[in-house]
Image (cartoon, helix red, strand yellow):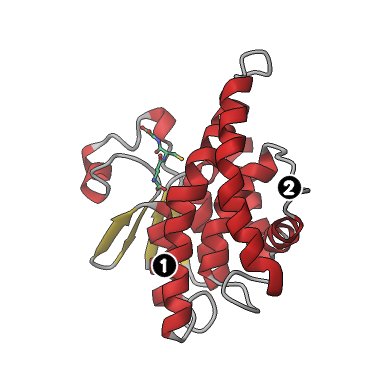
Amino acid sequence: MITLLGKAASRAGRCLWALEEAGIEYEHKPVDYAKGEAKTDSFRAINPNAKIPALTDGNVAMFESLAINLYIAQNYGKGSLWPDDAAGNSACQQWTLFAATELEPPSAARLVEFIFKTEENRSQEALDAAAEKTKAPLDALEATLRDRDYLTGDYFNVADLNVACVAEYLVRTKFALSSWPKVNDWITRCLARPAFAVMLDIKATEMAA
Ligand SMILES: N[C@@H](CCC(=O)N[C@@H](CS)C(=O)NCC(=O)O)C(=O)O
């Protein structure tokens, strides 16, 4: 059985979303990096980079949240999260790398200002720099979504999930998406999915404990 390691209030939340979308049984261990639980020898045996999330599944042990989501999609979401055709598959890989390299750096920089700093300590310069770097990837998404509801066509798959879980940082930090109406509609559709709501419930339960 799949075991996902990492508390939901971290990038592990992305993988919980993917597992819930896949609708499979899994075990969740809410490893907390803030308590040093990702620096143990047993955790490093799974992720030598000592960060959450990580995943095990039989003889598979892997890390990197977006790669984990590709694994879940390819192995447990064929025909839904993972398209059946080569064009769809390559698009999922492309959008995943886009999420990691183009959208995540400025979006995460913004999130850090919002969740780890008080309003008085927030750097407007850092927020502005992040906003500027977010524009080009948002333009690319807007152009793609001009003639379709989802990134690879007419249905939600791991391409959407992997980009949406990063774009969600923009929503969380109240980034104005009014100049990108198609992106705004798409992210609203993605975040309205029942599997996303389940992940939020898991996160809320963990945070209340
Ligand atoms: N690129 C990695 C980033 C993983 C990452 O930075 N995880 C954070 C929690 S969201 C962490 O474990 N931080 C602990 C640390 O930096 O020591 C991924 O997407 O999985």
Residue occupying image coordinates x 45% and y 86%: 85
Q: In which quarter of the image is the C terminus?
A: top right
Judge by depth and name the residue closer to the eye, 102 or 171: 102
Q: Label 1, on which residue?
A: 93
Judge by depth and name the residue closer to the eye, 115 or 58: 115
**What residue type is disc 2 on?**
Leu
Judge by depth and name the residue closer to the eye, 22 or 97: 97
- Report the side of 36 relative to 143 (left or right): left
Q: Position of residue 147 (x, y in %)?
A: 69, 74
Instruction: Give the answer, above or below, for where 114 lies relative to 121.
Output: below
**What residue type is disc 1 on?**
Gln
Residue occupying image coordinates x 27% and y 47%: 47
Q: Position of residue 30 (x, y in %)?
A: 46, 45
Q: Can residue 202 be seen in this view?
A: no
Query: How far apart are the alpha carbons under marks 1 and 2?
Result: 25 Å
**Circle 1 sits in a helix, a strand or a loop, which is it?**
helix
First in sequence: mark 1 vs mark 2:
1
Q: Label 2, on which residue?
A: 177
Q: Position of residue 56 (x, y in %)?
A: 32, 60
